[in-house]
Amino acid sequence: MAATVLPAAPVSADEPALRLITATGSVTVDRYPGDSGVVLDLGVYLAADERFELHVKRASYDRPPEVYRRAGSRDVRLSGPVKDFSGLPGFLELKVKNKRGRTVKRVAQKFCPAGVANRVRRDAAPVDLYPESCPAHPFTLGTVWGVQRGWALAVTPVGDRLTDLKPGRYSVEVSVARKYRRLFGVSGKARTVRLTVRDAEGRSERRVTLAAKDGSTEPGSRPSGESTVPEGPKPNLRALPAWDVTVSKENDAGQIVKKRDYLRFSTTVWNAGPSRLVVDGFRRDGEEVMDAYQYFYDADGGQAGFVKTGGFEWDPKDGHEHWHFKDFAAYRLLSADRKRVVRGQKEAFCLANTDQIDLTVEGANWRPENTDLSSSCGENTSVSVRQVLEAGSGDTYERSLPGQSFDITRVPNGVYYLEVTANPARRLVETSLADNTSLRKVTLGGVRGARTVEVAKVGSIKGH
């Protein structure tokens, strides 16, 4: 990793590497009753005439992320770290004028250089390489942002941020902040869009539907021949510290139990690479179980071997209702000296690439296909499933799901450790088994029926 700081030198205005373009000169948005404003989705894009790529990474959880510009085969550090992985702060400057030409609003807007990009040149690469979102996981270590040559990425809106504009007609001037124009070679030309804000009273409420992604590859037939574990790249599973830890009266069935206290927590197991983890399950005729096989790949991505590795079972519980790979992770609550198990349970997982953890590792897939539980976990009628955890990605089970809790009603107050172990039965073949376990220190307090928990920081990451 180079330590050179990229100088903020002006870039020739004749050949800008990046520029703003507009899809249309006029946009109408609805202001719904009860909303405090509107989403400024203006159809403005950042178009790349040359490939634009940034690597964002932090050396440890004690450090903020740094942004590196990809220059040939090396990374060149840009001056000034970003606060988190959500985007470049103050990248856009929006000036809103009313129909009389008076400026009524100035907005500085963050830009996430990752998203659903659009091909805008015939000679551009046919497939986008870059991630479809900026990561939000508290333990992300690295990600990649970028726009391919001949592609364009929408710059507005960022999330559902609302700008307080009354119904009426406006013009919005959109430009890139000067410091980013100098750093990245962005054209200084602003784009102006006519904006009509329409009163949506009486219209149906705004609804956002997220389509489930279903790009997973179906498994082939049950493998035959001798199982082999070849030389070459393997996955490397790592358990992140438990996070989003809280005390609740809600049990695994989602019921409130007044006289019980539950320690609920989220967990993530991720693949540090350099190879993807691929597990196929093949159902036994008429049974609720599948035999599982792990596959291995050579450096070129060709299948090089397989080994039988446990199995899948159908999980009928609410919140799951899909196929789980057995013994993928184990959770335990340990005593202060870490020698005594206070509470323990194992949780089978459906593997999915739910979170970007470090897309800068060797072999990382920046655009994994199976990114939610609907994409690879199968149905009760499935005869086979394929579950994949790509290098660089993590599989998260949130605290609201069954199995993500310990009953601590009768556990005394004091210091404990939440232990998360990936691949506890060591059925999966990995590069290393030495980094499979993580611990998170928690302190229980309060009284029965009103328990409390304090969670120790990991580096600069707060307890919850």
Image (cartoon, rainbow, N blue to C red):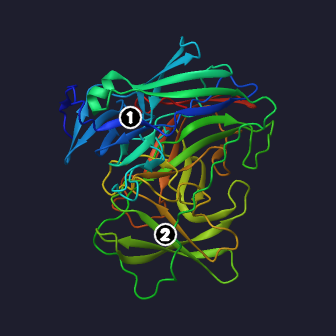
Q: Please name the amino acid that badge 2 sits on.
A: Val
Q: Please name the amino acid that badge 1 sits on.
A: Tyr
Question: Is residue 78 depicted above or below 350 in this figure?
Answer: above
Point out which mark residue 34 bears: none
The picture places residue 44, in percent across and down from the top left corner, at 47, 35
The picture places residue 210, in percent across and down from the top left corner, at 63, 49
Question: Is residue 392 depicted above or below 173 in this figure?
Answer: below
The span from disc 1 to disc 2 (Cα, nearest Å) is 31 Å
Residue in the picture at 35% in, 33% down = 65
Residue in the picture at 62% in, 22% down = 169
The picture places residue 149, in percent across and down from the top left corner, at 32, 48
Residue denoted by label 2: 279
The picture places residue 175, in percent across and down from the top left corner, at 41, 26
Q: Looking at the image, is mark 1 or mark 2 earlier in the sequence? A: 1
**Front in this rendered view, residue 343 or 425:** 425
Is 41 left or right of 298, judged from the image as shown? right
Residue in the picture at 70% in, 74% down = 381
Q: In which quadrant is the C terminus drawn?
A: top right
Residue denoted by label 1: 61
What element does badge 1 sit on? loop
Q: How crowded is mark 1: few (under 14 residues within 10 Å), some or many (20 or more)?
A: some
